[in-house]
Image (cartoon, coloured by chain):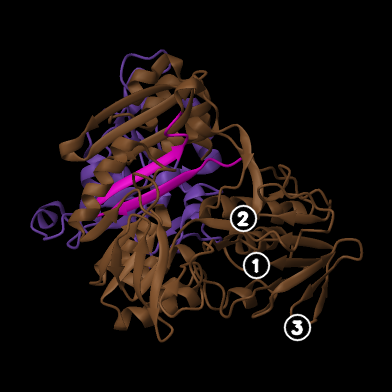
Chain colours: A brown, B purple
Amino acid sequence: MNILIVGCSAAGTAAIEAVRTYDWKSSIVQLSDERDPLYSRCLLPYWLSGAIAEEGLRYRDASFHRDMQVTLHEGKRAVRLNAQSQHVVCNDGSIYPFDRLLIATGSSAKLPDNIPGDIGGVCTLRTRADAEAIRECAVRAGGAVVLGGGLIGLKTACALGESGMETTVVMKSDRVLSQMIDREASRIITGRLRTRKVGVLEGSDCSGIHHREGRLVAVVTDQGRTIPCELLIVAKGVRPNVSLAEGTGIAVRSGIVTSATMQTTQENIFAAGDVAETYDIAREEYAVNALWTCAVQQGRVAGLNMIGRKASYDGAVGMNALNIGGIPLIAYGMTNPREESGCRVLIHGKRESALYRKIVLKDHRIRGIILLGRIDDAGVLLSLIRQRTDVSAFEEELMSSQFNFAGLLRNVGKTVIDAYQSS
Amino acid sequence: MKHVICRIEKCLGCRSCELACAAQHSESGTISGALLEPVPPTRRIRVERIDGSGILYRSRTLALQCRHCEEPVCVQACISGGIRRDVKTGEVRIDPEKCVGCWSCVMVCPFGAIVRHEGIGRAMKCDHCAGRPSPACVDACPTRALVYCERDEIQARASRT
């Protein structure tokens, strides 16, 4: 069987590993529009800050494709898919046939219309090439502006701050990480950022830029402020790279529509990672969760199903971990429910010690969690979200910082013991 | 592969395992030596209180460490590729050189078995005391609540006690 994988990041790599766990007969061809593509995007901020060397970006051994008997074609962008005759055409006209196709094309950074992308110093942070461009600018730059107060924006801002650059985060929202955490947690994080020499400008958007000789010199905000800087990093979210599926008959909503087997509406074509729309367990709706862990899990399920092994993706939970100025933060699912949503909220917090714990409940199930400061049993709580456990009998206990796996034994009992003993 | 399992009925919660684990993973490898080290060693096993006099158990504590899962979620979550499952031994290992301390593994481990070493900002967990025939926690357990044995043997022993 010919397996074709478009994309060489989390989902594509996981699919290869899943296939090769059981099947060394099928041929695997992988296409990537990047050079030396097997690196971890999530590590790019660490490389920018100098915390790791370029070699440290590598996600798997250099011999990965050889070891896995995968033919990797680098620098090829898949531009057209013919689902009926089962082939993909690349930008250079080359044609790749398949019996099974995995679309793992990921997502791209959004660039607002009023920001020209061809001015030196205007960057996004998505690929290694982006990071290289940022590093090149950073050598000359005295100041940097990061547009967007989401996870990527803050990670990038902290990285630039750590590398010694005067950095300001400009964001439309009135608080940082507004999609991920609530107001109280935002306040704690903002306080931390300020101690890291990262400025935060809430309620502002970039209304334009000044440039000289093709290079950025300042960013202008819609509040009338002009911030001199030589580097602007746009971190206004990502959009899934669905173009390959468009016009082929494959259903596309917020991303490529997938089933629990990660199949698209075309039986022999699969999708996984940032490009795929899947069921969200916490929100109880279909959504794109552009997260590394989700991409790996989806890629794995796709890989197994491509070779006819039964595997099912039980759904995504939005989740993120962040470590800012030594305060660890983990958040899952819906952390900021609207009042009419019928959710109940349990909160325990000590702002001065930067300890904060919030659990959002609905219909006796956990729908969202914020853990700030003490995060060690985060995964135990996540398992309660994933398994849709009725927590009504022990919800007060969940708020204890002492809650742990043994707490599950006490409250959930036999099934957990089986999990422990068979693990 | 062999696993460490805690027979809950026998666990006294004395935390000898925690001490032995920390000492084993210190520079000197001894309790007295570990006390003097600039970066204090961390235990990768934790005694957790099950509490109350449950119907299922007489005793109330569980000594818990990495379960070396067959399909480890931490490996799936690791953004650096620094957590890998050794296909030969079945053991799940963290490469300290690759770990960046992002805590993605902490975010997903259903046992809460990943330990954050805040001093050096790296994730750590049970490595079955690589190089020792039997893990230090097992050797240190005064009641033999902790055993180190094959998976099928675990089931048998668990149902026997």
Q: In 3D space, how far apart are the residues under numbered discs 3 and 2 (Cα atoms)?
A: 25 Å
Mark 3 vs mark 1: which is more N-terminal?
A: 1
Outermost residue to the right? A85
Residue name at image x 39 percent, y 58 percent: A153
Q: Is residue A348 left or right of residue B102?
A: left
Could you tell me the amino acid type at mark 1? Answer: Gly
Residue position marked by numbered label 2 in the rendering: A273
**Residue contact between numbered discs 1 and 2, judged by CB atoms under 8 Å:** yes
Outermost residue to the front? A224
Residue name at image x 37 percent, y 53 percent: A171
Indicate the quadrant containing the N terminus of chain A: top left, top right, bottom left or bottom right: bottom right
Marks 3, 1: nearer the viewer: 3
The one nearer the camera, A360 or A15, is A360
Residue A53 coordinates in the image, percent (x, y): 36, 77
Mark sitting on residue A92? 3
Work out whether A353 lies above or below B129.
above
Within the image, what quadrant is residue B5 found in?
top left
The answer to whether any part of residue B31 appears in the image is: yes
Mark 3 vs mark 2: which is more N-terminal?
A: 3
Residue A151 coordinates in the image, percent (x, y): 41, 53
The one nearer the camera, A180 or A60, is A180
The answer to whether any part of residue B43 appears in the image is: no
Label 3 sits on a secondary structure element that is loop
The magenta stretch spans residue A317: yes
Could you tell me the amino acid type at mark 2? Answer: Gly
Q: In 3D space, how far apart are the residues under numbered discs 1 and 2 (Cα atoms)?
A: 10 Å
Which segment did they paint magenta? A315-337
Residue position marked by numbered label 1 in the rendering: A7
Task: Report in which chain the residue with disc 3 lies.
Answer: A
Could you tell me the amino acid type at mark 3? Answer: Asp
